[in-house]
Image: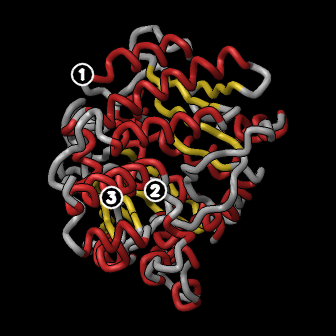
Amino acid sequence: MQRRNFVRLAGGGVVTAATLGTIGLAGCSADMPHAAIEAWQGPGAELAAASDLRRWLLSYAILAPHSHNLQSWIVDLGTPGEITLSCDAKRLLPQTDPLSRQIMMSQGTFIEMLDLAARERGLRADVTLFPDGAFGPDKIDSRPVARIRLTPDAAVAKDPLFGQILRRHTNRSVYDPNRPVPAAAWAAMAEAVRSSALRFGFAGAEQAPALAMHRNIAAEAWRIELTTPRTIMESFEVLRVGPTEVAQHRDGLTLLDPMVVTLNRLGLFDRSKAPALDDYATTSQIKDFGAKLASTNGFLWTVTPSNDRVTQVNAGRAYARVQLAATAQGLVMQPLQQALQEYPEQAKPYGEIHRLLGATQPGHTVQMWARVGYASAVGPAPRRRLVDFIRA
């Protein structure tokens, strides 16, 4: 084999494994540009002291979790005392999220973080979803997702989950297989969404047969996404390799492995095509993710009785609360959205996870499914500048 081809194949294998298996660890790298993660230090004193607190609130809202870290939030501050949230139609996932359900959930995580920040400053956030009408089931348009009216209110209670926003990170690494999630932690996560119109469920270390079924479904769904060219290419399109790309975009999936960065600089990493089914790039990643699933002894999920746009946004709000509650308990989590995605190749895992979680009645939908456990801390994902989200 020619050396150039060997380097490309070996590099491709490392790149794919890192890209899809360890995204979220990039923040541990000394090569992470400081500007790309400065938002995680919280708003500066000038925003905290400003008479108009909306930008202070937004500094926390933009730290919400988002599918593929696309950050598809646009805010309009044209009306005093209000924030109008819209979805950036250029930041969607048409291949893996063809109905934009996950994108709508990501609007909900933003709203929840905003509400928590408003409470912290004695503001009541009155949220009106889809004030000009909801999107259809298979499209996103320019109409607002939410209009949030902010009103000073001494009766508004602060929420302790606010204190976890700057600590919240998605963790895609191997978890500690010897530390089960304690009952008190499950109870805290359930309590965080007690008032939500959804069903919260979990399977812990004592439920070995159920854990095996969760792992099997997740592994198969992951294999499908890896081996479906158009879905893996969707991830490649938002992959940011090296500090220069990360600093330029401050979104998407981050990869800072020095060897991969060097290969990319030399033109030896080809992101223009999907790896073959039997490439090391594919087979190693399947093995790697299997090891992560094997280390996981806790899974959680939320199920809603319907799947309209309002329900999807509110399911996102609930997920944000669950993750913050888990963070307060010292836990980490990683969403397992592959089996919940509505593209044709995922039909079998989609049906299996819905049956396993008792979501078989018409309209019932598994909105979130995640692995949960203990793991070493990871660094934060990049965030764009606050001004990049504001349109007026």
**Quick one: 24 or 288, which is closer to the camera?**
288
The residue under label 1 is which amino acid type?
Pro
Which amino acid, by three-letter code, is at mark 2? Answer: Ile
* Residue at the spot 74% in from the left edge and 19% down from the top edge: 207
Q: Disc 2 to disc 1, how far (Cα)?
A: 26 Å
Label 1's element? Answer: helix
Name the N-terminal-most of marks 3 and 1: 3
Quadrant of residue 279 within the rendered picture? top left
State the mark number for residue 21. Answer: none
Residue 98 in view of the camera: no
Please name the residue that numbered disc 1 is placed on.
Answer: 344
Cβ atoms at labels 2 and 3 below 8 Å apart: no
Mark linked to residue 23: 2
Which residue is nearer to you in this view: 74 or 284? 284
Q: Residues within 10 Å of mark 3 (few under 14, many from 20)?
A: many
The quadrant where residue 319 appears: top right
Colouring style: secondary structure
Disc ID at residue 11: 3
Q: Residue at x 38, y 30 (%)?
A: 223
